[in-house]
Amino acid sequence: MVKTVSTPASEGGKQQGSVANLLYPPASYLDCMHPFTSLRRAWEYCRRTQRKHFVAQLQVRRLLAYDRRGGRVPWPPSYAMRPARLSICFYSVADNVEMWGTVFGAVMAYKDVQDGDMVYVRAGFREWNGETQLGDLELLPSHYIGRVVPKYHANRRLGTKDNLESLAKDALNSARQQAVATILQQAQTDEMTLLQAAETGFHSLEAVLCALHAPISIDEAELAKSAAKKLSAAALLLSRDRFIRRPSEPRSVIPNLEQHLPIWVERLPFGLTSDQKTAIREICADLAHHQPMLRLLSGDVGTGKTMTYLLPALAAQRAGFKVAILIPNVLVANQVANELRTLSPETPSVLLGGASKGKPDLSANPIVVGTTALLGQLAKYPLDLLICDEQHKLSEQQRSKLIKPWTNVLEATATAVPRTAALVEFGAMDVSVLKECPYQKTIYTRLVPCDTAAKKSVMAHLKSICAEGSQIAVVYPRLSNSERGRGAEDAALMWEAQFPGQVVTIHGRMEDGEKEAAIQRMKQREAMVLVATTVIEVGITLPSLSAILIADPDLLGLAQLHQLRGRVARHGGNGYCYMAPSRELEEETIERLKLMEKHDSGFALQEADMLARGMGNLISGEEQTGNRSVLFEGVKLLPEDLLA
């Protein structure tokens, strides 16, 4: 008799699979077609195929249970005493060979297994104390045998590991044609064109879906996984080709702007860097072209992005064209509007957002600067040039409300999101890069260990910085305390105790006037410590800020972390960025945060981020934060996948 395990029923009874289940490929497959009865043949199979695991039918000869301290405990276990480790002696009938295996933690799956039982297991070979043993043990149910079993990662939206297979099978019967229609809608093409471009070896998308979720062999399963990646890559390349072949729009042409620029260049208190001059020439050339501009202006904090886009904006307005600058928050909108008025007081401008009320007067063709308040006010305003500063804070849908077929678009950022990075990489977006910085500076970035000694060391350093006359900022991802950590409001009291009378606070619920007053106190050095939420991440300039401590950095994206780091040492010198988690982090999260230590360039950071997370949905722009929705959810594309 073969001992097997039961599979838990889906919560709430039978659930119906959906299109989303079919567009969520398995993470891996378990080949249970022909279980090994010979451990020797299993060893040869793993060595020949380079696979780490195999499926076998083995006899259990002996079970030994141990507690956390290594002491023997009875088996079968009692409810009160659950072993921490289980050692199992397996016997291969075909080889007449015994081999031990160990289970850590999940020993209760074996609670009904007794000496002499025949079982199906998934296992891998490992070396321990000079002996070959079985590891990664998983007890398999009998209905796995004779099949290739898809294994899914748990997904909060779609289901648990236990029910995703059944949901996908149900969806194959009820939603297969809908899934095909969804794929074609996302790819914006027909089935034959997509299949020919992908060269998958499958005759239809339905065949790909069936092979993904109900393969008849491990070879077909692996071919289907490869097909999902090839289809996604083909869809992106087709999208790029459509972008390159986009139609001419004579109304988009804004010619001869460089002739207007010397007026404002002469007024600048500093000379333009060579990168700025090159970027301005590229922007002006794009604007003179018969196709609408779509350009990324990528430069780290302090490399002069604002002036690089303000000069072409002023020239376009002087030539009679309609210009708007979309900025993610009021503080930075005020700052840009002030820079614009200082540089060109004769140019009409309008600030929208924050305290601005009423319908703006656009009769003088002003340059409109503002937050997302622009979206409603300018919905019917035929913009010729739209500049989006810090585009990672604004969704594709938000920007699209202001874009007409002829509208030229310039996106500026210190850290391009993965979607944009890929568009740049594969020719579907032009890019100007600012690398030169007017000031020499070095910012030391450190992920602080989650222990008392490390935190005390950082606090001592921050106090020494303030004692020397420089300022510090402390940023919290949230305003109020939660189970995830301390909030800025409560933390401000703690910092006030450390720096009496020297602390100001900024957060999103404050009135615009209160925020501005806090910034002025820092600029006038009436306060030395700024405690804030991430509202300060974009564009705030505090010349004396030498260090920033970011609490719970695992709750923030790399773009946010890099922007916050950019608040430090704006006028040169040494700066310090500390990332201080309040709890132990998972290895994957630590690796992501370590990218901040490795890369001080925003462009290098976003390239590393793209490689780590994937490139987002280049087709629709709906998913800009990584690899979740490129035809198939969870299919991660890297540059080499598109260049293959």
Image (cartoon, rainbow, N blue to C red):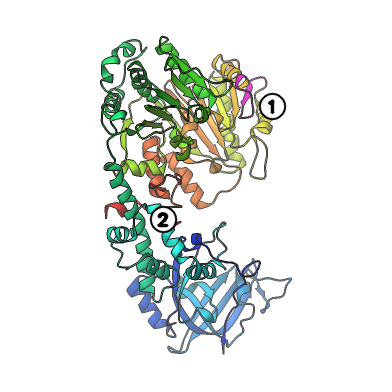
**460 shown above or below 94:** above
Q: Secondary structure at mark 2?
A: loop
Q: Residue at x 44, y 70 (%)?
A: 29
Q: Quadrant of the C terminus?
A: bottom left
Residue under label 1: 497
Please provide percent x and percent y for residue 496. 67, 25
Quarter residue 148 falls in: bottom left
Question: Which residue shows up at 45% across the image and 56% down it?
Answer: 634
Dot 1 or dot 2, earlier in sequence: 1
- The amino acid type found where label 2 is placed reads Leu
Query: How many numbered circles does the render carry?
Result: 2
Q: Residue at x 29, y 33 (%)?
A: 249
Residue 33: quadrant of the picture? bottom left
Tell me: 65 left or right of 144.
Answer: right
Q: Nearer the viewer, residue 552 or 220?
A: 220
Disc 1 crowd rating (10 Å Cα; few below 14, some 14-19, many 20+) is few
Q: Compared to 603, does 316 lie above or below? A: above
Q: Position of residue 412 (x, y in %)?
A: 39, 31
Left or right: where 492 falls relative to 424: right
Q: Which residue is tagged 2?
A: 631
Report if residue 639 is visible in the image.
Answer: no
* Boundaries of the magenta span: 500-513
Along the viewing direction, whichever of 217 and 289 lies nearer the viewer? 289
- As for residue 453 lying within the magenta part, the answer is no
In this view, the residue in front, 241 or 590, is 241
Numbered disc in front, either 1 or 2: 2
